[in-house]
Image (cartoon, grey):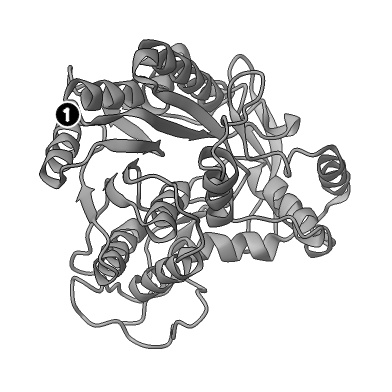
């Protein structure tokens, strides 16, 4: 059957198996042999299958030759449903790593669980390694507390007052106003439980207590700040509160493991198209304008560009230097996005944009392409007219 994207309300419900595979392969090809020596040796990536997590694993393995162990929660193909994009990405990563003689183990399970942490410890002992880099890149709507079994759900909502902002349908170009009611106390607390630093802390404690955390290891969690126009729904909202908790956790880890020389920090990354960003009010329109401005100035970066710069210019400089951080101890990879000239031009365009001039002032088509490519569609070199094999491994779907 021919697999076509099934999109509802800026959410893609399926993935193209060959497209996801080819996209992952292209990222690997870009990273291969691009890094100097002196990087990480054994890397644990928690949330390894898409976006910044996948870019981190690819950079560590194919750039620096590191052994990588990855965790992600994916759904395999079944019947008429495709697997999740990360399911195909994980398999192509492991295939390519094996072909180059790189150590690679992928666990597809709930990374919040105790079992995941136990598996990471067992695998490190089996391989005879200690993790010297731990990347925490989980983005999940739900988390089951490993102690109580209680399920928590995260929400993207403002705090204290409703939020109204313009958003755009990436497929029709239609602009509309989105109204989001404020979160209640339970929603706020649950979002922090899911997206805050509690689980990251549990991971580091589990690795350290088992003796598989290398002395002087580095652990990095990813976050975002963004422009003031998005702060009510993002940085000052439920997600932002969770991110503040994540930042506090970094300081807590540094303090508790100072005697082991553990460096824990947050990397504030650039706005990019992810499977989640398309449904956050104002973000699709802002990112589309941002892309247009940054591409015109030749400073646009995708996930892999950002992570290669994180490794090369921040974490593993040659010669090795202290990691540059801001006044709050954060790595700032968003400095190009948040530059005054870029933000001024983006704000100017957003003030003038309408449905008639949308494609002149923004890169809405680029936003749409990136969104579809994250699901294996519109990937160069893929024949989308060809039928996928009627095999669970191929993840076929009925025509939509």
Q: How many marks?
A: 1
Task: Establish if 13 lies above or below 191.
Answer: below
Quarter of the image for residue 115 reads top left
| 167 left or right of 36 in image | right
Q: Position of residue 12 (x, y in %)?
A: 44, 58
User: Closer to the camera, 2 or 345?
Assistant: 345
Q: Is residue 297 visible?
A: yes
Quarter of the image for residue 121 reads top left
| 69 left or right of 160 in image | left
Of the 4 image quadrants, the one containing the N terminus is: bottom left
Q: Secondary structure at mark 1?
A: helix
| 394 left or right of 339 in image | left
User: Closer to the camera, 181 or 67?
Assistant: 67
**Residue depicted at x 37% and y 31%:** 217
Q: Position of residue 56 (x, y in %)?
A: 44, 49
What is the residue that sits farthest to the front in this orientation? 319
User: Closer to the camera, 234 or 172?
Assistant: 234
Q: Residues within 10 Å of mark 1 (few under 14, many from 20)?
A: some
**Residue depicted at x 51% and y 25%:** 243
Tell me the residue that label 1 is attached to. Answer: 114
Q: Position of residue 315 (x, y in %)?
A: 52, 39
Q: Position of residue 154 (x, y in %)?
A: 41, 29
| 248 left or right of 158 in image | left
Task: Establish if 232 lies above or below 105.
Answer: above
Task: Establish if 95 lies above or below 209.
Answer: below
Of the 4 image quadrants, the one containing the C terminus is: bottom left
User: Closer to the camera, 42 or 374?
Assistant: 42
Q: Is residue 279 visible?
A: no
């Amino acid at each position: 059957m021919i697999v076509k994207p099934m999109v509802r309300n800026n959410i893609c419900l399926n993935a193209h198996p060959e497209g996801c595979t080819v996209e992952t392969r292209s990222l690997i090809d870009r990273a291969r042999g691009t890094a100097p020596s002196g990087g990480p040796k054994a890397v644990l990536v928690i949330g390894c299958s898409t976006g910044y997590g996948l870019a981190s694993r690819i950079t560590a393995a194919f750039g620096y030759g590191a052994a990588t162990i990855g965790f992600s929660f994916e759904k395999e193909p079944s019947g008429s449903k495709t697997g999740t994009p990360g399911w195909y990405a994980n398999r192509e990563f492991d295939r390519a790593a094996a072909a180059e003689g790189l150590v690679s183990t992928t666990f597809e399970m709930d990374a919040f669980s105790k079992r995941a942490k136990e598996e990471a410890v067992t695998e490190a002992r089996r391989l005879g390694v200690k993790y010297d880099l731990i990347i925490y890149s989980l983005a999940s709507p739900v988390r089951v507390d490993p102690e109580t079994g209680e399920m928590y759900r995260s929400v993207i909502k403002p705090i204290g007052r409703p939020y109204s902002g313009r958003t755009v349908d990436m497929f029709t170009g239609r602009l509309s106003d989105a109204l989001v009611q404020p979160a209640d106390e339970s929603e706020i607390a649950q979002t922090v439980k899911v997206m805050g630093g509690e689980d990251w802390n549990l991971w580091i404690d589990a690795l350290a207590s088992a003796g598989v955390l290398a002395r002087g290891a580095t652990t990095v969690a990813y976050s975002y700040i963004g422009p003031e126009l998005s702060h009510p729904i993002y940085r000052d909202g439920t997600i932002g509160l969770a991110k503040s908790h994540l930042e506090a956790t970094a300081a807590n880890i540094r303090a508790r493991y100072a005697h082991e020389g553990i460096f824990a920090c947050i990397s504030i990354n650039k706005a990019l198209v992810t499977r989640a960003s398309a449904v956050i009010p104002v973000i699709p329109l802002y990112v589309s304008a941002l892309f247009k401005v940054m591409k015109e100035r030749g400073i646009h970066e995708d996930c892999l560009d950002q992570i290669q710069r994180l490794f090369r210019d921040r974490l593993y400089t040659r010669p090795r230097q202290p990691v540059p951080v801001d006044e709050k101890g954060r790595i700032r990879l968003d400095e190009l996005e948040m530059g005054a000239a870029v933000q001024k031009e983006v704000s100017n365009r957003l003030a003038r944009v309408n449905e008639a001039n949308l494609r002149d002032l923004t890169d809405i088509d680029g936003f749409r392409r990136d969104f579809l490519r994250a699901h294996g569609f519109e990937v160069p070199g893929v024949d989308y007219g060809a039928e996928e094999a009627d095999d669970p491994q191929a993840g076929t779907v009925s025509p939509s």
